[in-house]
Image (tube, grey):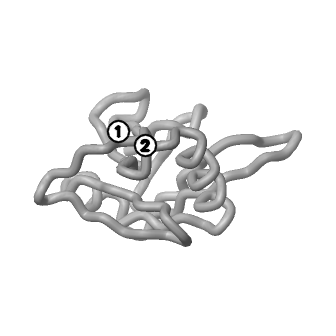
């Protein structure tokens, strides 16, 4: 299961609050595609399946991952940066043997 840094958790909470729907969770998934073989997908989702893995961070930040993606995200960390050089979410995944230049796909 992926771990959120405090900064990422705070930003996700801020974005969830803007949505105004308490049933939403952050879904993180790994899908085939991208220039290195797999790509990350993140979106707010109100639906759950029985085999989803759910973890709560801070007050009210639920993260949902399907079981297949959870295997590829074990030990991964989601961070958020807001600076001049880098802004946005990034995933540090120790399971990735190589990544592409855009940082959005891995193998």
Q: CB of mark 1 within 8 Å of CB of mark 2?
A: yes
Q: Quadrant of the C terminus?
A: top left
Mark 1, residue position:
38
Look at the image and tell me in which quarter the N terminus lies.
Answer: bottom left
**Picture quarter containing residue 73?**
bottom left
Q: CA distance from mark 1 to mark 2?
A: 5 Å
Marks 1 and 2, the one that precedes in the sequence = 1
Q: Secondary structure at mark 2?
A: strand
Q: Position of residue 64 (x, y in %)?
A: 33, 56
Q: Is residue 75 left or right of residue 50?
A: right
Q: Which mark is residue 85?
A: none
Which residue occupies 84% across, 41% down?
85
Q: Residue at x 40, y 58 (%)?
A: 63
In the figure, residue 71 lies in which quadrant? bottom left
Measured as percent of width and height from the top left, residue 104 is found at 51, 37
* Residue that appears at 43% across and 53% down: 97
Q: Which residue is mark 2?
A: 106
Q: Residue at x 67, y 42 (%)?
A: 88
Spot occupied by residue 96 in the image (x, y as percentages of width and height): 43, 54
Is 71 placed left or right of 50 in the picture? right
Label 1 Cα crowd, 10 Å radius (few <14 / some 14-19 / many 20+): some
């Amino acid at each position: 299961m992926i771990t959120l840094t405090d900064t990422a958790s705070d930003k996700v909470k801020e974005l969830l609050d803007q949505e105004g729907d308490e049933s939403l969770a952050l879904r993180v998934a790994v899908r085939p595609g991208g220039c290195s073989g797999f790509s990350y997908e993140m979106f707010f989702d109100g639906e759950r399946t029985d085999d989803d893995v759910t973890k709560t961070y801070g007050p009210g930040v639920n993260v949902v991952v399907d079981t297949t993606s959870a295997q590829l995200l074990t030990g991964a960390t989601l961070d958020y940066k807001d600076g001049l050089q880098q802004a946005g979410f990034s995933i540090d995944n120790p399971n990735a043997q190589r990544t592409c230049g855009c940082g959005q796909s891995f193998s």
